Image (spheres, rainbow, N blue to C red):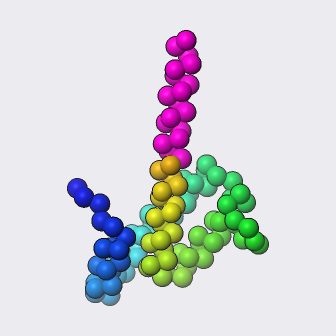
């Protein structure tokens, strides 16, 4: 299965019917919430943002705005971060396994 770029997804979203747009928005919303929950576990909220709001509050603001393009950009960054954290955790486990066999 090939991956669809954000540009392609945004173009498809813009051409979709109102009903389809609602489905796209709900799916993206739910996936963004899931990624945010994952990151909340691994990252201290106050370490990602300057200003009066935590990064989680800023995510909530974007979600409440229901702007598909903003939500898509945010989701991409959150997902990239979650995948990077997951890769780092796996790498650290491999390093730990290497030390236990010495």
Residue 100, image x, y percentages: 56, 16
Q: Is residue 28 above or below residue 20?
A: above
Residue 7, image x, y percentages: 35, 74
What number of labels is visible?
0
Say which residue appears at 52% left-offset and 20% top-offset: 98
Q: Is residue 91 magenta?
A: yes
Q: Residue furthest bottom?
A: 18
Q: Residue furthest right?
A: 52
Q: Residue furthest left?
A: 1
Residue 40 showing in the rendered view: yes
Say which residue appears at 42% left-offset and 70% top-offset: 28
From the viewer's perspective, is 44 left or right of 26?
A: right
From the viewer's perspective, is 53 left or right of 8?
A: right
From the viewer's perspective, is 61 left or right of 49?
A: left
Q: Is residue 16 magenta?
A: no
Q: Is residue 33 above or below residue 17?
A: above
From the viewer's perspective, is 46 left or right of 10?
A: right
Say which residue appears at 53% left-offset and 41% top-offset: 88
Say which residue appears at 44% left-offset and 78% top-offset: 69
The magenta stretch is: 85-102
The image quadrant where one finds the N terminus is: bottom left
Q: Is residue 49 above or below residue 41?
A: below
The image quadrant where one finds the C terminus is: top right
Residue 90, image x, y percentages: 49, 36
The quadrant holding residue 3 is: bottom left
Residue 19 showing in the rendered view: no
Overall secondary structure of the magenta section = helix
């Amino acid at each position: 299965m090939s991956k669809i770029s954000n540009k392609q997804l945004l173009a498809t979203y813009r051409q979709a019917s109102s009903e389809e747009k609602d489905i796209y928005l709900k799916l993206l919303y739910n996936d963004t919430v899931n990624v945010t929950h994952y990151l909340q576990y691994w990252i201290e909220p106050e370490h990602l943002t300057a200003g009066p709001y935590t990064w989680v509050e800023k995510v909530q603001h974007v979600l409440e705005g229901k702007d598909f393009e903003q939500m898509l950009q945010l989701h991409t960054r959150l997902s990239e971060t979650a995948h990077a954290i997951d890769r780092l955790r796996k790498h650290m486990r491999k390093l730990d396994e290497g030390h236990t066999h010495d």
